[in-house]
Image (tube, rainbow, N blue to C red):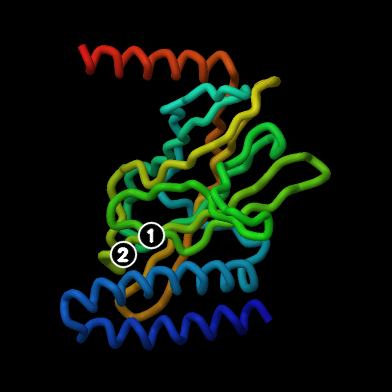
Amino acid sequence: MGADVGKGLKSRFQRAGAGAKKAPRGRGRAGAALLCACAMLAAAAAVAAATAGEAYALPAAALSGRVHGAEAQEGGGFLFTLGVSVSESAEAYCAIDFNVVSSDYERLHILDLAASPDEKLFEISFAEDFGTAYHKGRVDEATGEIDYLIGIFDQNSQNGIKDAMEICGITFVYEGGAPQTVRLENLQLVYFDADGTVRSEKKGETAVIEISEEALLADAAAGAGAESGDGA
């Protein structure tokens, strides 16, 4: 079934790509954004169904994370931003997805702004001209981890991502207590080729970011000092 879905999305993606070449400038940009979003879904379905267990070619790009903007909360714990960056790639691509895994979903999770417990509105900001195709979380009751899948695409070009950059900022809630970790893993790049085909590459390396009260207190103090200096 997954292969059929992947083929169907891929076929729609190819037809849309053919039409986008003839669109005016403004409409072409919107069409390219739709193409990239469709490409991510098509590639994810196709890779999962057709290439399970196979070795993936590794792209040059890799993920890294930087903690900043920590704020101690009155009731205890912290809010902070994890800036997720991607290194330069050997080949330009149109979309990217990856997993963000917290070691303990009760102590460390992405801020949820949804008013209803049945909804999810994660606090994630994206670099200019980037959009999100999907972001969702899944709790592993056995390990206590929560695994977020995040997909991002370039809204301006079919294959417009190549340079190293911070692609998104994720607001986390850390309740304090024992140190925790955030893993950035399962990086996948998606390409839309000139002949209408969709390719994807996965990279196996994992970036691990340590989260602790001591580190966040230091970051909060550094931020307060910088603000005090700016106001002097």
For this rendering, which residue is in front, 171 or 168? 171
Residue 6 percent coordinates (x, y): 56, 78
The image's mark for residue 37 is none
Mark 1 secondary-structure assignment:
strand
- Amino acid identity at mark 1: Gly
Mark 2 vs 1: CB contact within 8 A: yes
For disc 2, the marked residue is 155
From the viewer's perspective, is residue 151 above or below residue 218?
below
Residue 79 percent coordinates (x, y): 52, 30
- Amino acid identity at mark 2: Gln
From the viewer's perspective, is residue 10 above or below residue 83?
below
For this rendering, which residue is in front, 222 or 94? 222
Callout 2: 10 Å neighbours few (<14), some, many (20+)?
A: many
Residue 207 percent coordinates (x, y): 53, 36
Q: Which quarter of the picture shows residue 176?
A: top right
Question: Measuring 65% from the left and 77% from the top, which residue is drawn there?
Answer: 2
The image's mark for residue 131 is 1
From the viewer's perspective, is residue 53 above or below residue 231?
below
Mark 2 secondary-structure assignment:
loop
Q: Is residue 54 left or right of residue 159?
A: right
Q: Quadrant of the C terminus?
A: top left
Q: CA distance from mark 2 to mark 1?
A: 6 Å
Residue 126 percent coordinates (x, y): 38, 50
